[in-house]
Image (cartoon, rainbow, N blue to C red):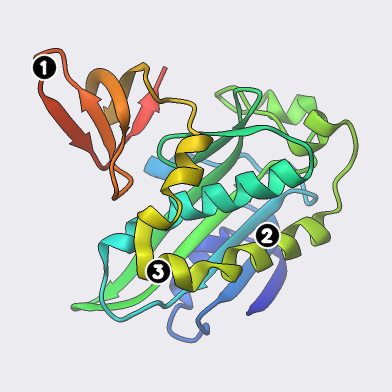
Amino acid sequence: MNIISFEKLDSTNTYSKKNIETLADKTVISADLQTSGYGRFNRSWVDLGSENIYMTFVLKPSDRLSGIHANLTQYLSVILCKQFEEMGLSPQIKWPNDVLLNGKKVCGILAETVIKGNVLKGIVLGIGVNLNASIENLNEIDRPATSVNIELGHTINKQEFMQKLVENFFAQYHEFLITGFLFIKEDYEKRASFLEQQLKIGVFSIIKEGFCKGVDDNGNLILLMPDGKIEKINMGEIVE
């Protein structure tokens, strides 16, 4: 693995996509400052300062897209949760891949693919972690958010945290690619904040409501709908 660090980028995901042909598999792109960071559904990502994590894993697992690749964000959410737990925190996962501390978002994860013709050139798996942020900056975010330093009451060493996250991610990466979501299903469910609850799921402009019965072996949400039918949701997000 190779970590390439920049002082400033528009976005680590954007840079990685633009340079996917020349970047080696398992390269990690990191930036101290993102001028045009973004999250799922093109939401803007608020830059909280250089002591927070903005980075992207460049992955080239094969030249064909697989269903397992869609679960990489959930795999990364579990890896991050375990690292938080080692620090004495109690994280939860909000489907599909948001990581929460005390019910507030602390991390955003976004995977994007680069495909030319029928060939998968690579997957860019971006993550932003609120590691060392001020309450004032967190208040600029349009939803409840927190940071690790606020939850623990002290500053976190960014380089140590980032290096450990990269090492933890790749430690079981190949096993995950073989087994898929089943490899993390128990760990994922253990930390899930949404099980056995009535949920609203936003899929673009459509809202679906149902009772969450769990997640299936592919990481899809299993909803019991008002008409008694079971529906499996593979995209979207939980809305309040």
Q: Earlier in the sequence, mark 3 or mark 2?
A: 2
| Inter-mark Cα distance, 3 to 2 | 18 Å
Relative to 2, is 137 above or below?
above
Kindly report the distance in space between the C-alpha atoms of the residues bearing marks 3 and 1. Answer: 35 Å
Report the quarter where the N terminus lies. bottom right
Give the labeled residue for mark 1: 228
Q: Is residue 136 left or right of residue 187?
A: right
Label 3: state its secondary structure. helix
The residue beneath circle 3 is 177
Q: Quadrant of residue 85?
A: top right
Q: Residue 164: x, y in percent?
A: 73, 62
Mark before the other along the chain sequence, 3 or 1: 3
| Residue behind mark 2 | 165
The spot of residue 123 in percent (x, y) is 41, 68
Q: Nearer the viewer, mark 3 or mark 2?
A: 3
Residue type, label 3:
Leu
Q: Is residue 181 left or right of residue 170?
A: left
Give the mark nearest the N terminus, 2 or 1.
2
What's the distance in space between the residues labelled 2 and 1, CA to CA? 42 Å
